Structures are given as C-alpha cells and as structure tokens.
Image (cartoon, rainbow, N blue to C red):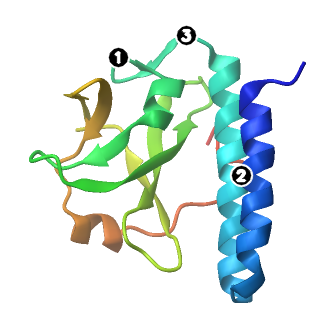
Amino acid sequence: MHHPKTAFASLAAACALIAACGETPAEQEADRAEAQVEREADQSAYAASNEVAALGMTEAKLLDADLVTADGTDLGDIEAVRRNAAGMVTGLVIELEDTDPDRWVEVPTEGLIARADSDDMDVQTGMSAEELSALPDAEMGAMNAPV
C-alpha cells in the first residue's frame, strides 16, 4: 500500500514535469529544488510523528503553516525546519511570497509565535516582507539535517 504523501509527491512531480516544458533552465532548477525540499520535509515530518517540534506545534503542523505578519499578511510558506545537532528546531525555511524565481530564506525561531488562523495555525513574525527579502538565500542541501 502506498503512503498518501508518497502518491501526492509523485503526482506533484508529474505535474511539475508537465509545467516545466515552457520554463527556462533556471525555473526548472528552482522547481526541482522545491520538489526536493518538499520531499525531505515530508519525510522528516513523518519521522517526527506527533512530537512537538517548536512553538507548540508538530513538524507537520509547522509545514502546513504560513509565515504571517501581526495583521495576518501572508509572507510565505514554511517549507522545512532546521535543527541543531541536539535535534532542536533553530530555524524555519520559508518560500517567500510573490518571488520569481522562487526564493527560500531561513528565519530563526527566536521571536516567532504560533497564531491561530480559523481552523489551523500560522507562525507570526515581527519581520517585514522587505526584511525577509534582505535575508540570504537558504542553503538548499539536506534541508532537515542538523546544522
């Protein structure tokens, strides 16, 4: 029996291949990197199970959350968590909203708070979109490996 996330990842990869037909090489590379990040994040969340990872949320809940401002403005999607050698979550890798090509930055967990959003949770930051854009690109290799 196939795990639903595995089937979904396969479907997403197939859709990405079809969509890639009209993309530039840089866009295709960004799509491949994003697919790899999502696969690694899903595997890590599955392995972490129901353990609270950070901010009172499981890793799966973190990966479902958006990064938002205090007024609820969506700044980006949480794509992966970063852990230190002890396994503690030290940062979140965010795919910034409205960037072309896609951009990922790492945001430290200090100062972040969990925030209820109707029927799910988001993560709130005090950083602005401009401050997030000024962060360096996240290291894309081994996204969920200890740093």
Residue 126 in the image, given as x and y percentages of width and height: 16, 49
Q: CA distance from mark 2 to mark 3?
A: 25 Å
Quarter of the image holding residue 16?
bottom right
Cβ–Cβ below 8 Å for labels 1 and 2? no
Left or right relative to 97: residue 118:
left
From this view, report whether residue 32 is shown above or below residue 142: below
How far across and down, in percent of the image, does residue 18 sit?
Answer: 77, 70
Tag shown at residue 85: none
Left or right position of 70 against 35? left
Q: Is residue 14 left or right of residue 117?
A: right
The residue at 45%/69% (across/down) is 136
Residue drawn at the location 32% of the way across and 46% of the way down: 67
Residue 141 in view (yes/no)? no
Q: Nearer the viewer, mark 2 or mark 3?
A: 2
* Camera-nearest residue between 125 and 111: 125
Q: Residue 50, labelled with which disc?
A: 3
- For the residues marked 1 and 3, what is the alpha-carbon distance in whole angstroms? 11 Å
**Residue corresponding to mark 2:** 12
SS of the residue at dot 3? loop
Q: Quadrant of residue 28?
A: bottom right
What type is the residue that disc 2 sits on? Ala
- Label 1 element class: loop
Q: For the residue carrying disc 2, how many other residues have a C-alpha within 10 Å: few (<14), some (14-19), or many (20+)?
A: few
Q: Which residue is mark 1?
A: 56
**Quadrant containing the N terminus in the rendered view:** top right
Residue type at numbered disc 1:
Gly
Closer to the chain start, of discs 1 and 2, is 2
| Amino acid found under the numbered disc labelled 3 | Asn
Q: Residue at x 70, y 55 (%)?
A: 35
- Sequence-wise, which precedes: disc 2 or disc 3? 2
